[in-house]
């Protein structure tokens, strides 16, 4: 039985271990969504479905299927000492890697070419082009059973642009490799060795620490990373059996808040609130002096208020609140494909004319934050907050 999306419902359902009626119901409700562009054989999971993570992608091949699993959520430690004890005591030691601040991308091969999937399971044309240039394709030929997970980081970044890493454009930092079949990750050192063999760039490794020493070591690492506004660390079971945990620096946290409050009506409250709470627990755990506490309060307050006030002033001066980002591509076609991709996702963007740099094109993109602009304008015109 073939559905209007061109998928054999019975076979796909069997592959996913779902009853066929459930599978067609999920298609109907658009919980499983058929991809729209040239990647016609891809289906994206818009939310979690019986053990299959949100963002997972079903690939329909000529006579088989493949499931590229979404990257699992990483829980956060709010206080380091008890979280490490509680979550990793079975492991005896933990491996600490840098948590880099960019966007999450999965790379796999599709019809002989690499494709890059975003967290939500879209094929991003920009990330796909970059992945094709950044990654050694041999890996995918020699290991069709594996998926690469990594962070796209750097200034030429349409989603999370950052200058703090000293990168010229955009690089892909591998942080996980998993089996397609069951989503199981490789142990950390095995993954690092394999990625190293193919010359992949990887997230920084800080080391392996005994559970007893880990908190003190991580606290030191976090203080150092904070000085350069880096984001933080991910703490992992060397075997990757226990779930990893993330822990972040106050400075990176404040950078997030500055961004969120500049676009205060576009940013989610679930994004902002936990970032304020983290500051309270970190200050408590670090047993800060009155002076340190005062600094933290000042930093937090400034991160919230200054960007917001700047936005209000801009609207008062008849400007639209927006954000400038950049992309750099080799193929001019990618520019149009990326523009229509963003428009399709409902992002309000203005692309500049491409500027030639070496054998690449740099394009500036202005992303308009309409909701914050409108809200601010209406408040300035006397609308009440309801
Ligand atoms: P999550 O659902 O994973 O908590 P989030 O979008 O809120 O997602 P973050 O707070 O940025 O995410 O933390 C998790 C993300 O950190 C991962 O999805 C991954 O993209 C990124 N990351 C960066 N460096 C690493 C690393 N070394 N190991 C694992 N993930 C990393
Ligand atoms: Mg992130």
Image: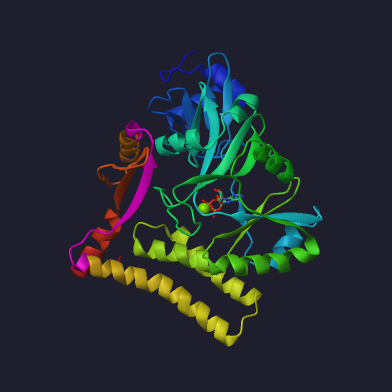
Count of numbered labels shown in the rendering: 0
Depth check, front residue: 159 or 112: 112
Q: Specify whether residue 383 is in view.
A: no
Residue 115 spot, x, y in % from top left: 49, 31
**Applied colour scheme:** rainbow
Residue 176 covered by magenta stretch: no
* Extreme-bottom residue of the structure: 290
Pick the residue in front: 201 or 122. Answer: 201
Question: Taking 129 as reference, is 383 left or right?
Answer: left
Quarter occupied by the C terminus: bottom left
305 sits left or right of 384 in the view:
right
Find the magenta span and give its range. 315-334
Q: Is residue 82 above or below residue 290?
A: above
Residue 361 in the image, given as x and y percentages of width and height: 34, 40
Q: Position of residue 238 (x, y in %)?
A: 75, 49
Which residue: 65% across, 36% down?
178
Residue 213, compared with residue 238, is above or below; it is below
């Amino acid at each position: 039985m073939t559905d209007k999306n061109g998928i054999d419902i019975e076979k796909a359902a069997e592959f996913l271990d779902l009853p066929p009626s459930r599978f067609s119901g999920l298609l109907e409700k658009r919980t499983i969504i058929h991809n729209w562009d040239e990647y016609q054989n891809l289906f994206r999971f818009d939310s979690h479905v019986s053990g299959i993570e949100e963002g997972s992608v079903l690939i329909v091949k000529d006579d088989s299927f493949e499931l590229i699993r979404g990257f699992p959520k990483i829980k956060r430690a709010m206080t380091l000492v008890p979280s490490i004890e509680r979550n990793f005591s079975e492991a005896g030691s933990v491996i600490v890697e840098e948590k880099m601040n960019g966007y999450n991308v999965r790379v796999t091969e599709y019809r002989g070419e690499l494709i890059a999937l975003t967290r939500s399971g879209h094929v991003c044309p920009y990330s796909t082009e970059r992945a094709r240039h950044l990654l050694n394709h041999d890996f995918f030929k020699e290991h069709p059973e594996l998926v690469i997970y990594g962070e796209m980081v750097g200034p030429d970044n349409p989603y999370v642009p950052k200058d703090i890493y000293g990168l010229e454009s955009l690089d892909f930092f591998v942080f996980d490799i998993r089996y397609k079949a069951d989503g199981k990750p490789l142990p950390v050192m095995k993954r690092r060795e394999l990625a190293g063999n193919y010359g992949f760039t990887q997230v920084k490794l800080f080391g392996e620490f005994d559970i007893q020493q880990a908190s003190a070591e991580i606290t030191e690492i976090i203080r150092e990373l904070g000085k350069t506004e880096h984001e933080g660390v991910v703490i992992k079971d060397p075997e990757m059996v226990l779930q990893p945990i993330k822990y972040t620096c106050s400075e990176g946290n404040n950078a997030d808040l500055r961004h969120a409050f500049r676009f205060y009506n576009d940013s989610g409250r679930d994004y902002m609130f936990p970032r304020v709470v983290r500051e309270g627990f970190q200050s408590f755990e670090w047993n800060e002096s009155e002076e340190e506490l005062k600094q933290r309060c000042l930093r937090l307050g400034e991160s919230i208020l200054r960007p917001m006030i700047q936005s209000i002033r801009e609207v008062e001066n008849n400007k639209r609140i927006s954000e400038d980002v950049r992309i750099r591509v080799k193929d001019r076609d990618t520019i149009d494909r990326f523009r229509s991709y963003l428009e399709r996702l409902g992002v309000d963007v203005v692309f500049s004319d491409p500027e030639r740099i070496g054998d690449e094109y740099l394009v500036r993109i202005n992303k308009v934050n309409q909701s914050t602009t409108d809200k601010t304008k209406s408040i300035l015109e006397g609308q009440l907050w309801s």
